[in-house]
Amino acid sequence: MLKSLAISQIYVLDQNKALDFYVGKLGLKVKEDQDLGFMRWLTVCVPGDESREILLERPGQPVMDEKGAAEVRDLVTKGRAGGHLFFTTDDCRKTYAELKAKGVEFTDEPTERPYGIDAGLRDPFGNHIRFSQPTSKP
Amino acid sequence: MSEATEESNRRLLRARDAMDRTYAEPLDVPALARIAHTSEAHFIRTFRATFGETPHRYLQRRRVERAMYLLRRTDRDVTEICLDVGFSSLGTFSRTFREIVGQSPSDFRREKETRAVPACFAMAWTRPSSFGEARGHRRT
């Protein structure tokens, strides 16, 4: 039986820019940053919740050829790569104000939804991210 | 794909996000073109090449998606919803809604409400496709 979700992955076009954004602006923490030779294994997590890592993976060789990488980059920058991340927060409006002040690009301002108050943003590459102040535990 | 194309995609996506936020306002191509750092004529052409539909059509689908939500989640009158989402004529709203969704707004309202999922997924998946119109809407 499966027990938990440990690592999920999204594509980023530049891992250093991804660090600037996910750590420098969103406030996530670097969990692992290792040069494995064939790839840079770069994961981040929410501070205090290190059991769930997000792999920030750069599309490219050798896992895919240049044409394939170009297709992925095209999808990411069109917002079609499916790299959605959904976080929770205790105070959506406060988090929104803090991130807005840091220059984060928002798609949605905090809005009351059936499941809570949430807001949406994009990372520098086009991936969509939401954070929600849930009305109740899922 | 060149970095210039990636940058163009990203700017167009930024403009499209702005359309999502201001869906009830008239289509402001000059403002969107400024966000995308293009001329107005180039904006419409590249938007269509990038996302497969014109900005006008994208906005129509966004408005209809919003109307679908309001029809199911509120008791507001169809005419009020039509105006709320940015249509200025009930006739145009009803015709566009039926063309895209395959049902009239009133018929759509009668169907059962679905579970609330995160807004990005609800927006994307409840928005009727413009690539096949009403045929693609009905779930199987």
Image (cartoon, coloured by chain):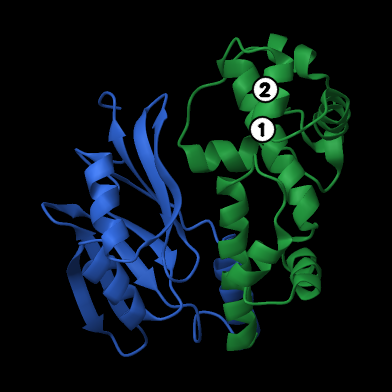
* A116 relative to B2, above or below: above
Secondary element under disc 2, as helix, strand or loop, is helix
- Give the residue at x 82% y 35%: B100
* Chain identifier, colour green: B
The residue under label 2 is which amino acid type? Ile
Can residue A21 be seen in this snapshot? Answer: yes
Can residue A72 be seen in this snapshot? Answer: no
Disc number for residue A120 = none
- Give the residue at x 40% y 73%: A57
Secondary element under disc 1, as helix, strand or loop, is loop
Q: Position of residue A111 (x, y in %)?
A: 40, 35
- Compared across the picture, whether B113 is left or right of A95 comes to right
Residue behind mark 2? B81
Residue behind mark 1? B85
Which quadrant of the view contains residue A46? bottom left
Which quadrant of the view contains residue B88? top right
* A65 relative to B129, above or below: below
- Give the residue at x 85% y 27%: B98
The subunit carrying tag 1 is: B
Image quarter of the C terminus of chain A: top left
- Give the residue at x 72% y 61%: B29
The residue under label 1 is which amino acid type? Val
- Compared across the picture, whether B110 is left or right of A92 comes to right
Tell whether label 1 touches label 2 (CB within 8 Å): yes
- Compared across the picture, whether B69 is left or right of A94 comes to right
Q: What is the spatial separation of the Cα atoms under label 2 and label 1, in whole angstroms?
A: 6 Å
* Chain identifier, colour blue: A
Image quarter of the N terminus of chain A: top left
Instruction: Let me know if marks 2 and 1 both belong to one chain.
Output: yes
Quick one: A64 or A123, which is closer to the camera?
A123
The subunit carrying tag 2 is: B
